[in-house]
Amino acid sequence: MSVTAAPGFVAAGGAIGIKPGGAPDVAVVATADGRPVPAAGVFTANLAAAAPVQVSREHLERTGRRASAVVLTSGNANAATGQPGAAAARQLCAAVAGVVGSAPEEVLVCQTGLIGVPFPAHVVPGVAAVVASRTGGVDAGAAAARAIMTTDTVPKEAVARPDGAGCTVGGMAKGAAMLAPDMATMLAVLTTDALVEPDALQRVLAGAVARTFNVLTVDGCTSTNDTVLLLAGGSAGPVETAALAGAVEEVCASLARQMADDAEGATKTARIAVHGAASEVEAHRAARKVAESLLVKTSLNGEDPYWGRVVSELGSAGVRFTLGRTTVRYGGIAVCAGGVAVPHDAPAVAAHMSGRYVEIDCELGIGDGRAAVLTTDLGYGYIDENRTTS
Amino acid sequence: MSVTAAPGFVAAGGAIGIKPGGAPDVAVVATADGRPVPAAGVFTANLAAAAPVQVSREHLERTGRRASAVVLTSGNANAATGQPGAAAARQLCAAVAGVVGSAPEEVLVCQTGLIGVPFPAHVVPGVAAVVASRTGGVDAGAAAARAIMTTDTVPKEAVARPDGAGCTVGGMAKGAAMLAPDMATMLAVLTTDALVEPDALQRVLAGAVARTFNVLTVDGCTSTNDTVLLLAGGSAGPVETAALAGAVEEVCASLARQMADDAEGATKTARIAVHGAASEVEAHRAARKVAESLLVKTSLNGEDPYWGRVVSELGSAGVRFTLGRTTVRYGGIAVCAGGVAVPHDAPAVAAHMSGRYVEIDCELGIGDGRAAVLTTDLGYGYIDENRTTS
């Protein structure tokens, strides 16, 4: 139970023939009564944004950020598909609207798959039967989460009901960069029963995304289709914004962590933390530079605590940095202090590196800025996953 | 014959015990008479710059950009080694100066190897015997080029004597990112017999580096030790600056290409060209984004002309971009035009992808900006080379 955890939402998953062999390739999340509710969206910053991203943005703008349903398809990104692609995305929304009884612009659309392959518009009418099967409850939410999987090995769902918050937030997600780069995309849909205005909802979602999905970096590639949506049904009545924000961030953080852990081809999840930077912005920039370094990522794959590469990345991250003030820790154990090697418990570091989770902490000794980024290792699995699309 | 091609320069290569087993690990290039001549240097922008980079910068500053010799060692980067590392780099310069009869600050130093490992200062006195063996001629230049190799499989040398230029430029180089990322470094030393003032020489070198070494990107990592030096002996007398600049760029371009071709673990060299960008700066930024994309690089490894990843990178490069105006060509054959797939000769594209050299051309249709970047593919070889330092 996830995207259907909050009262007032229904879901369904099914197959319409985008993927071969009848594999699930379409999901829908909708309000139980088909009426539009406040909706927030965070989309890729890629200027080659896919047709569904353009259509969903346009719909949110036209409705003043309200939606009655979200339709998600997998197997074709409908990106770099020109006007026919945009028309197909609109047809998907119209088909769903026809069943739930809302206006087409009240339906949002997310798609994931190969870029540049014309979308098979003839499958669109099949969506109606899937939408008609929508229902509440655990199984429906799980079916929707399974239908948006691509190379994910497990569906990703999360629910938060903080004590005293008075509302529920549930969500589902798929993919993230390395997870499924052929599929190019991370998608997530969240729902809540909180009663909240669209603008406040947008701020809540944007803040949560910045602190969760946006600090997960696998290969530094920004997809054409990335989309995170949040619909607020309102049946729980008004809630404290801070409580809602906390619950939304909790769900996003769980989904982001599930993505990193399920990264195909990855054998490690690593948290790169930077402390003592001149500012939070610089801390984030430095952490991301280390997290995206091919040399650091291959070292993680080889379980080699080669901190020289970490300081080299910190030194070229474009942030204030003084080697002589820098300390690097693996699993809490300092291997470099004052910019030079220090004696340390090598077997303990080796034991830490051999685990699934690796923690690298970098203290810059300059200011109070701190940030952390999640990443994965780089090994044969990433190559195998990505060298060809066939 | 390379670094000794220009009259007035001598060189030597030898072993002093930095590397195990007596492998060559030290090279020297010097003026034949030991007198200082105008010298230019371009160094890494990494704030964690190694001791030799700091010492060479300081020496050029103190002498007003003059040098009588360059000493290069391989097997230890002498980076993140604190004050003892800086002292060792100075001792190397002093040892060379003692033999060639110059002041210590007239000697420049380049080092390459593992970061963060204390430099074995006890080997420094051994340098004297190697310097004493310096001589002119082809063999001496070749010995020096071999002594700075790390995981390079072939020495890299180049000579240019443009018609009518009235001077000779020769050079040697090692490594580059992926080539030898354990070694962390690219080093190059060039010599010429042109008579030129230090400031003009610096401008010539900086321009050539910007258009050659700096448009070669393998993994986007900026080393702690990158150094390019150019010494001008002057025996050929004054020359046209443009002619000298052309010859220096020709040598640098050849060395950069040799580095890409010898990239360990790489099976492809690719040239990513961007035309029609809003400016040259934007063209360069876009080309570099495509060239450093893990998804594009793995596609090169798989010989897959997946242009969707190319437009996705262009769209997220932070440059002006309109998908509908974009054309992508592999080996001159358009696979995407107006932002969508176009019919093309697929067997011809496949044949191009199967070669060692791949050309990807991106036309943005916005302005006159153009730039090109050299890169390599990403496959098992890179992982094998970099997962551990042992």
Image (cartoon, coloured by chain):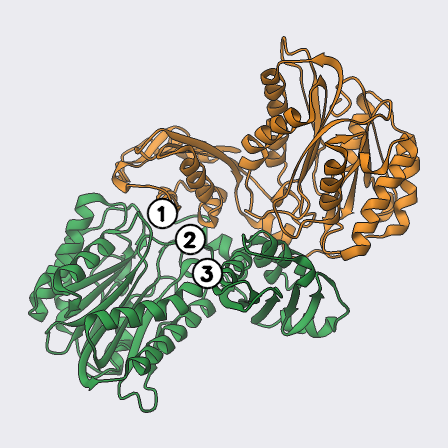
Chain colours: A orange, B green
Q: Which of B104 and A35 is in front in this view?
A: A35
Q: Position of residue A117 (x, y in %)?
A: 77, 56
Q: Quadrant of residue A11?
A: top right
Number of on-image labels: 3
Please say whether residue B212 is visible from this viewpoint.
Answer: no
Residue B95 located left or right of residue B259: left
Q: Nearer the viewer, residue B241 or A129?
A: B241
To which residue does mark 2 refer? Answer: B221
Question: Which disc, if any, is residue B217?
Answer: 3
Q: Is mark 3 on a helix, strand or loop?
A: loop
What's the CA distance linking mark 1 and mark 2? 8 Å
Kindly give the residue lying farthest to the bottom in the view shown: B164
Instruction: Residue type at mark 1: give it.
Output: Ser
Kindly give the residue lying farthest to the top in the view shown: A164
Q: What element carries label 1?
A: helix
Evaluate whether label 3 is on the same chain as label 2.
Answer: yes
Q: Mark 2 lies on which chain?
A: B
**Disc 1 crowd, CA 10 A, few/some/many (<14, 14-19, 20+):** many
> What residue do we see at 46% from left, 47% from top?
A293
